[in-house]
Image (cartoon, rainbow, N blue to C red):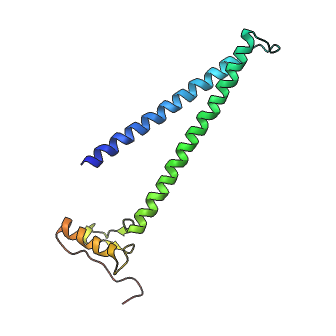
Amino acid sequence: MITDRSDKVHETWRQSSERFDYFVLAVTGALCAYISQTLVLRPLAFSPNSSEFLALVLLCASVVAGFRRIEAAVTVYRTNHLYLRALEEQRGLAGMLFGSNHDPSKAITFAVKRGTFVEDEYFRVCIAVMNEMPYLPEQPGKK
């Protein structure tokens, strides 16, 4: 399917982007460590020593910004995951528990509310995919 291909391409791009961010952050951190070891502090003036100190400060700022970027990406992934999970649970896509025979037509779908549009859509999908009516057991405590 097209969506499967695009999902794979997006996942590959995301992983490559993360690896590149980690690599650049590691190289910048190592460069900061090297410069700070070899730096000889002198009074600030228009000299090569002052420009080296300024470069070290800017590199340290870029390391902090790199960590913040990675932290923001992780936060976005977590928020997106929680949003999609809530959306799937709301639509009844989660909570389908199969019995021991793993027959999808016998799925227990307590997340699908009876008498709603979602239940009608679930029935239409089951009929179209499996060519049979799905099994919806009575909810516990209701007869």
> For this rendering, which residue is in front, 45 or 69?
45
Which quarter shows the C terminus?
A: bottom left
Residue drawn where x is 38% and y is 38% of the image? 12
Q: Position of residue 109 (x, y in %)?
A: 35, 73
Residue drawn where x is 33% and y is 42% of the image? 8
Question: Which residue ends up furthest to the top in the rendered image?
Answer: 47
**Residue 88 in the image: above or below residue 136:** above
Does the rendering let one see residue 38? no
Q: Position of residue 24 (x, y in %)?
A: 54, 27
Q: Position of residue 80 (x, y in %)?
A: 48, 53
Question: Which residue ends up furthest to the right in the rendered image?
Answer: 43
**Residue 117 in the image: above or below residue 9:** below
Can you tell which quarter of the image residue 125 is in?
A: bottom left
Does the rendering let one see residue 11? yes
Q: Position of residue 59 (x, y in %)?
A: 64, 24
Q: Is residue 32 left or right of residue 46?
A: left
Can you tell which quarter of the image residue 92 is in?
A: bottom left
Residue drawn where x is 57% and y is 38% of the image? 69
> For this rendering, which residue is in front, 110 or 59?
59
**Residue 77 in the image: above or below residue 18:** below
> Count the marks: how many?
0
Question: Which residue ends up furthest to the left in the rendered image?
Answer: 131
Question: Which residue ends up furthest to the front in the rendered image?
Answer: 46
Q: Is residue 34 left or right of residue 87?
A: right
Q: Is residue 49 left or right of residue 114?
A: right
Q: Is residue 88 left or right of residue 119?
A: right
> For this rendering, which residue is in front, 44 or 27?
44
